Image (cartoon, rainbow, N blue to C red):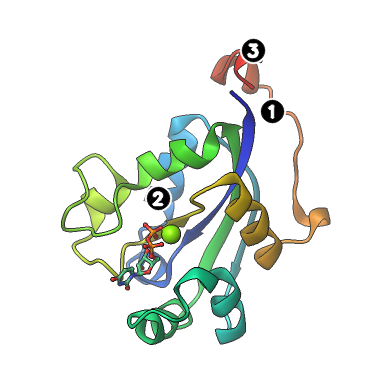
Amino acid sequence: MALERTLILVKPDGVQRKLAGKIISRIEDKGLQIIAVKMLKITPQMSKQHYAEHVSKPFYPELEGFITSGPVIALVVQGPEAVSVMRTLMGSTNGRASAPGTIRGDYGASRQMNLIHGSDSVESAKKEIGVYFQDSEICDAPSVLTPWSWAAEEA
Ligand code: UDP
Ligand code: MG
């Protein structure tokens, strides 16, 4: 096991629908640590960097239109196996098929407007964190709750 970082976005639909508080609460409730946060508007250039693996796919133009359509909230979340823990918390891509109890399963019914992004691997996380944050914007301060959130041997 290892302490990992993952890049999370509350997507424009989550911000516009005023679900950001609920979505961020789910991350806090899970016991993961938020070590960076900012609101910003994604540019087409950032979208192409972030979604490099999808740029040539038929759905990309609409995805870029959506992700650049309004402010997002970007977060860096840290914890043991944070990448897969967040993917489980988020649910599968299509909100219509995501399990109840997951963020996408509870709050949405769209495949595109699925409220939240989470990196799919430690390698993607590293690349994606670099799209949104400078090293100096990451506040990796020890939390007094960490010893109550996971054991030393899990991190
Ligand atoms: N997406 C879309 N149409 C599709 C597949 C994906 O609009 O047919 C959007 C959706 O917002 C998704 C994002 O593109 O979250 C990235 O797709 P991916 O397959 O990587 O899903 P994720 O990793 O976000 O679950
Ligand atoms: Mg993905």
- Image quarter of the N terminus: top right
Q: Quadrant of residue 87?
A: top left
- Image quarter of the C terminus: top right
Can residue 150 be seen here? The reply is yes
Q: Tell me which amino acid carries mark 2.
A: Ile
Q: Which residue is mark 3?
A: 153
- Element type where label 3 sits in the image: helix
Question: What residue is drawn where x is 60% and y is 17%?
Answer: 154
Which of the two discs, 3 and 1, sits closer to the camera?
3
Task: Give the image location of residue 40, x and y in percent.
Answer: 59, 73
Q: Which residue is mark 2?
A: 23
Q: Nearer the viewer, residue 152 or 1?
A: 1
Q: CA distance from mark 3 to mark 2?
A: 28 Å
Q: Tell me which amino acid carries mark 1.
A: Ser
Can residue 41 be seen here? The reply is no
User: Relative to 107, is 18 on the left or the right?
Assistant: right
- Element type where label 2 sits in the image: helix
Q: Is residue 122 above or below residue 33?
A: below
Ligand 1: quadrant of the figure: bottom left
Question: What residue is drawn where x is 69% and y is 28%?
Answer: 143
Q: Quadrant of residue 117?
A: bottom left
Q: CA distance from mark 2 to mark 1?
A: 21 Å
Task: Give the image location of residue 62, x and y in percent.
Answer: 35, 84
Q: Nearer the viewer, residue 59 or 66?
A: 59
Task: Give the image location of residue 80, x and y in percent.
Answer: 57, 28
Q: Is residue 103 above or below residue 141?
A: below
Task: Give the image location of residue 145, x and y in percent.
Answer: 62, 22
Q: Is mark 3 within 8 Å of ligand 1?
A: no
**Between discs 2 and 1, the one toward the N terminus:** 2
Q: CA distance from mark 3 to mark 1?
A: 17 Å
- The disc placed on residue 143 is 1
**Between discs 3 and 1, the one toward the N terminus:** 1
